[in-house]
Image (cartoon, rainbow, N blue to C red):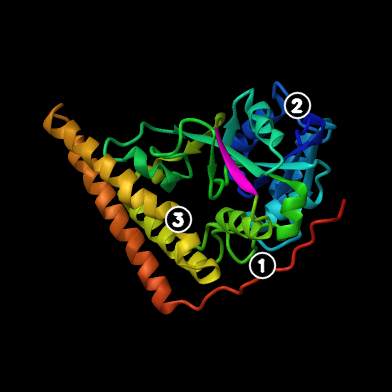
């Protein structure tokens, strides 16, 4: 069943004063769609000053609603709170440091013509504040929350959507219970992420015939600050990703939790290493050596995070935290 723009709610979670200019750009891009949404909901995550600024900004915009996150602190709680105030039959999530292309919603909407589609996500292109470091491999752009080399170039089913650019049918989102609020990169180290992956896996358990769709034509640009182009951040984030996957393995088992990761390790990374070698040997690009090194160190770091967490950390609860999703 297809959906109309009058049934789409865009939800943006925001938390930091210093990201307010980026949040304004995200809101503007959501409002400037060729297929305008029913509403844009901005949920402020436990920041009274930012809440006041946002409410003042939106006071004369009937299509923008600003709400205070009354759930647990973090991106999961803020997204759930925003969803609870939404009225659309499709809930679309955009990061507060991302800007959507003008046809973003129109491209996401196309995926819902298939009744088996539970949710649709799109391509996330990096918008580096400075230039991307020569050593940073495109195969590891997931480190900065973006679509990486190796993803399909055409619409295709996928295990999970990526947080900065994803949408769900409302009934699916509510049946799952929203995002787990005990994960979402807040309150611990290494931070436990993959809340978007957990939601998608759980949804497919409830709807065995359902699927999630990756639509690369639904594009957003995601701002990447300077500090995320440094080796320290790269390795730390790879470790945290491995740790998060271990938590997913405790919840859903190794087969489901590592399905995409096995493909990444067996196909994407070897192809990337061959490309880096060719850049070095055939084209004389010394940065190829650095990119190859980054891929190997990234894999080792992620593997270490996974192994340590599997061996030492107590598993998360098998069910998500209780969340109110029906306040509208």
- Residue 269 visible (yes or no): yes
The secondary structure type at the circle numbered 1 is loop
Determine whether 78 is above or below 277 in the image: below
Q: Earlier in the sequence, mark 2 or mark 3?
A: 2
Q: From the viewer's perspective, tell me whether residue 74 is left or right of residue 176.
A: left
Q: Position of residue 141 (x, y in %)?
A: 40, 42
The residue that disc 1 covers is 320
- Measured along the vertical axis of the image, is residue 197 above or below residue 121? below
SS at mark 2? Answer: loop
- Crowding at dot 1, Cα within 10 Å, few <14 / some 14-19 / many 20+, comes out as some
Which of labels 2 and 3 is toward the front? 3
Few, some or many residues within 10 Å of mark 2 (<14, 14–19, 20+): many
In which image quadrant can residue 318 be found?
bottom right
Q: Position of residue 311 (x, y in %)?
A: 39, 77
- Circle 3 sits on which residue? 259
Residue contact between numbered discs 1 and 3, judged by CB atoms under 8 Å: no
Residue lying at the far right in this picture: please name it: 328
Look at the image and give the residue range highlighted in magenta: 210-215
Q: Is residue 34 left or right of residue 289?
A: right
Earlier-in-chain disc, 2 versus 1: 2
Residue 17 as seen in the image, left or right of residue 129: right
Q: Residue at x 76, y 31 (%)?
A: 37
User: Any magenta on residue 154?
Assistant: no
* Separation of residues labelled 2 and 3 (CA atoms): 36 Å
Provide the residue designation for mark 2: 36
Residue occupying the far front of the picture: 209
């Amino acid at each position: 069943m297809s959906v109309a723009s009058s049934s789409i709610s865009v939800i943006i979670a925001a938390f930091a004063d210093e990201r307010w200019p980026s949040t304004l750009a995200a809101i503007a891009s959501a409002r400037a769609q060729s297929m305008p949404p029913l509403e844009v909901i901005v949920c402020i995550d436990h920041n009274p000053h930012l809440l006041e600024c946002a409410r003042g900004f939106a006071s004369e915009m009937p299509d923008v609603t600003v709400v205070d996150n009354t759930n647990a602190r973090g991106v999961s709680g803020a997204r759930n709170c925003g969803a609870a105030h939404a009225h659309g039959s499709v809930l679309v999530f955009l990061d507060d440091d991302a800007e959507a292309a003008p046809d973003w919603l129109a491209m996401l909407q196309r995926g819902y013509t298939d009744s088996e589609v539970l949710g649709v996500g799109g391509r996330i292109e990096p918008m580096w504040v400075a230039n991307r470091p020569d050593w940073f491999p495109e195969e590891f752009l997931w480190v900065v929350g973006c679509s990486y080399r190796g993803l399909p170039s055409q619409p295709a089913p996928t295990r999970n959507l990526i947080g900065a650019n994803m949408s769900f049918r409302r009934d699916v989102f509510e049946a799952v219970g929203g995002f787990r609020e005990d994960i979402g990169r807040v309150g611990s180290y290494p931070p436990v992420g993959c809340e978007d992956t957990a939601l998608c896996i759980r949804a497919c358990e409830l709807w065995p015939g359902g699927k999630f769709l990756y639509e690369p034509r639904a594009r957003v640009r995601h701002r990447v600050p300077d500090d995320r182009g440094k080796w320290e951040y790269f390795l730390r984030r790879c470790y945290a990703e491995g740790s998060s996957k271990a938590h997913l393995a405790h919840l859903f088992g190794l087969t489901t939790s590592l399905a995409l990761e096995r493909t990444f390790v067996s196909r994407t990374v070897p192809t990337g290493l061959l490309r880096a070698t060719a850049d070095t040997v055939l084209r004389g690009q010394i940065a190829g050596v650095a990119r190859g090194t980054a891929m190997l160190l990234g894999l080792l770091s992620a593997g270490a995070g996974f192994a340590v967490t599997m061996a030492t950390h107590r598993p998360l609860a098998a069910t998500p935290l209780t969340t109110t999703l029906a306040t509208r």
